[in-house]
């Protein structure tokens, strides 16, 4: 089978971890005779912006449309305001290609210890389904009475039935496939009293079609605390764009850090390319040193393989990462080691070969 | 000095912990000859609602207005929708009385262990200043196309310069009084691109008047992760209504649980009564058993005393709680003990007597 991949290394440590990602793709071709990738690399990033005053060419989205998948490194530099780099590259991709699911496994890998004193591997193995196209990131709003004491800014949270139903449906379908048969939805309907009660209603509606799944609806504040106190009770967690974002960074922290956390921006219908990327950002503070952890990027390729129908390749990637972590000989500084990005990447590829 | 207190025990475990709170007030009078409280107890809660179809009488707010402070237990039962109990009691009090600061210390008490493996008491001692009157809890919004596939709900985040400046100013003033001279502001200006950039601008404006304070502005997702990975770098954290809410439940979790966490809803100008309450809710699952942890309620009275100008009384309350925790003989089930609410309350009062 042949797959076309658009790779966008991006800024900062993005290109550094992407290099390991591209090596991983090669290794997969090598190991699985039936898979071929054709990869085009795009230099759309903040440097590109500083030269062209746009994050990608005018026909950028059209260019991407024809690929099977998009692989992203990380975007952002101190020189370009976040709302430009984000709103002219990442968010248009997520939205144009109806990547309405942002899938983020929270799993303590073997060989790693959680910063939570009493939690072990079996306690920390769940997945967050984040709405990825609407909600709090609406781009709708503005200001009034600028430069007066009465100045104000308004931003709309926009929740549609269409957008909410599809993510809740997806989350339940995922819950049906997993062992624990539990779904936890994040809300804040006590404080945010128009949009979140609507979200809750739809959760309850969809829950009725899934009587085998235990549904809990928790306020986001309480749920954030449960990530610390009782993560073992979580299986599939579903949240709005903002809540899913907060919960997954928190989730990454309790399983060992952002350097490890992968994500998939998925269009389940496969009508458009899906995009796979580390949760971490471009980390300007360590960029250029070659010491970034490549695991999040490599694991993102695992998620990509699963999306393309090769679940066993995701298992291979994850178990190879775990083997390296268990041995504990090679690690980047964030893992307490002294190795370079490429050394950790190489160690993982070697394991993929051996397993 | 004489202070009038309106006590609203509320629902569930609210009245159970309030009882210990009222005992604490008595003890304070006993220990400090110069302080007298006159206390009126109000039965405004969900039972009241079920009888009268309102959470408080029509003139409820006017009644409260004349008190020096309000002491709240907890509000909410499964029988009354959250948005009623919250929007007809707690939020009107916060707003009418311009309690625009919600002050929430995150401090690992001596005698307790953090669930964070590598964090000790000196790592976990900061304070969150939460905006308490506007922002995401706007009560502004609604629905369109109900009962069609095109149904949608919109909720406005409303940030005013007035409302934002006053909370940021307060946070900086607090930071000036503390040792670390650091202020961390929560934002999400990369995703929420109208209201949060406005918030950031005001943080930066006010920061210029406080050159001795180091200011960091972090996205809420990253900041939630920092609560786990590097809480020792936090001193004063300031967040919007929603972000402050999420961060403080998370903060409570990393210092030992919601049963311990106090809060003050403060009108710094003292033009109106301030309100002190535990962060925890009414906990219907354990209500009626007499096993709720009274510490959050008792500590809230410490915060109240500080607000009334008796900082040393807050120290007395906190150090007495710590003494009991260090001894470790008396504890409610959430602390791993087998004692009743009143036993823990009594033990703390005894310490207050002795210290
Ligand atoms: C009851 C609810 C609206 C409230 C809030 O979010 O403000 C509670 O969680 C709190 O933190 O006091
Ligand atoms: C860059 C930013 C807008 C983004 C988000 O919040 O979606 C990032 O934090 C992420 O989680 O992918």
Image: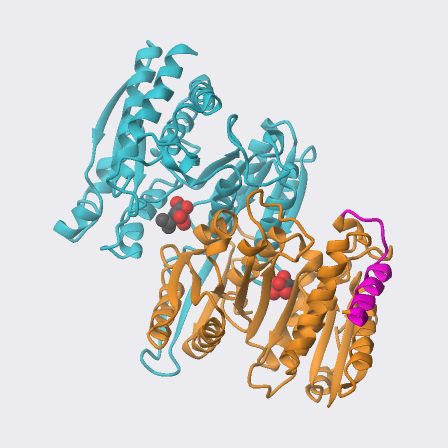
Chain colours: A orange, B cyan
Quarter holding residue B276: top left
Nearer the observer, B243 or B345: B345
Q: Can you say which quadrant of the picture contains the N terminus of chain B? A: top left
**Residue nearest the viewer, comparing B102 with B73:** B73
> What is the x, y in percent for residue B342?
29, 27
Residue B307's place in the image compared with B238, above or below, is above
Q: Does B313 appear above or below A268?
A: above
Q: Is residue A349 magenta?
A: yes
- Quadrant location, the C terminus of chain B: top left
Quarter holding ligand 2: bottom right
Q: Is residue A275 visible?
A: no
Give the residue at x 26% y 31%.
B6
A13, above or below B271, in the image: below
Residue farthest along the front direction in this orientation? A355
Q: Place residue A32 in its image quadrant.
A: bottom right
**Magenta range:** A336-354
Q: Is residue B293 left or right of residue B47?
A: right
Residue A36, compared with residue A122, is above or below; it is: below
The answer to whether A63 appears left or right of B123 in the picture is: right
Q: Percent position (x, y) of residue A284? A: 78, 55
Residue B259 visible: yes
Pinpoint residue B335: horizontal percent, then vertical percent: 42, 34
Which of the pair A52/B130 is nearer the observer? B130
Q: How many marks?
A: 0
Task: Decide if residue A251 is on the left or right side of residue A210.
Answer: right
Residue A234 position within the rendered picture, expressed as x and y whole percent measured from the top left: 48, 59
Residue at horizontal 42 percent and vertical 32 percent from the top: B269
Q: Residue at x 62, y 36 (%)?
A: B119
């Amino acid at each position: 089978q042949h797959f076309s991949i658009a790779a966008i290394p991006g800024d900062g440590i993005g290109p550094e971890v992407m290099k390991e990602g591209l090596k991983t793709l090669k290794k997969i071709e090598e190991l699985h005779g039936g898979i071929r990738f054709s990869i085009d690399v795009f230099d759309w990033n903040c440097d590109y912006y500083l030269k062209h005053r746009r994050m990608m060419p005018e026909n950028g989205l059209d260019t991407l449309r024809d690929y099977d998948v998009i692989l992203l490194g990380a975007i952002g530099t101190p020189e370009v305001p976040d709302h430009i780099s984000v709103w002219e590259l990442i968010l248009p991709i997520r939205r144009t290609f109806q990547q309405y699911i942002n899938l983020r496994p929270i799993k303590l890998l073997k060989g790693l210890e959680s910063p939570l004193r009493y939690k072990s591997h079996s306690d920390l193995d769940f997945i967050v389904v984040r709405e990825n196209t609407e909600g709090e990131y609406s781009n709708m709003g503005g200001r009034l009475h600028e430069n007066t004491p009465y100045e104000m800014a308004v931003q709309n949270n926009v929740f549609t039935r269409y957008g909410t139903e599809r993510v809740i449906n997806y989350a339940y379908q995922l819950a049906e496939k997993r062992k624990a048969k539990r779904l936890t939805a994040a809300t804040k309907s006590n404080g945010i009293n128009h949009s979140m009660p609507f979200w809750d209603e739809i959760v309850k509606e969809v829950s009725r079609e899934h009587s085998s799944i235990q549904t809990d609806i928790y306020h986001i504040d309480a749920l954030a605390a449960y990530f610390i106190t009782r993560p073992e009770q979580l299986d599939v967690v579903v949240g709005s764009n903002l809540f899913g974002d907060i919960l997954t960074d928190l989730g990454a922290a309790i399983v060992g850090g952002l350097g490890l956390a992968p994500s998939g921006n998925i269009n389940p219908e496969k009508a458009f390319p899906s995009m796979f990327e580390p949760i971490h950002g471009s980390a300007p503070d360590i960029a250029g040193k070659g010491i970034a952890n490549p695991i999040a990027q490599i694991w993102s390729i695992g998620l990509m393989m699963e999306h393309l129908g090769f679940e066993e390749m995701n298992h291979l990637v994850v178990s190879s990462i775990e083997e390296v972590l268990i041995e504990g000989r090679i690690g980047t500084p964030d893992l307490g080691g002294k190795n370079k990005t490429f050394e950790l990447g190489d160690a993982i590829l070697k394991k993929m070969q051996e397993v």
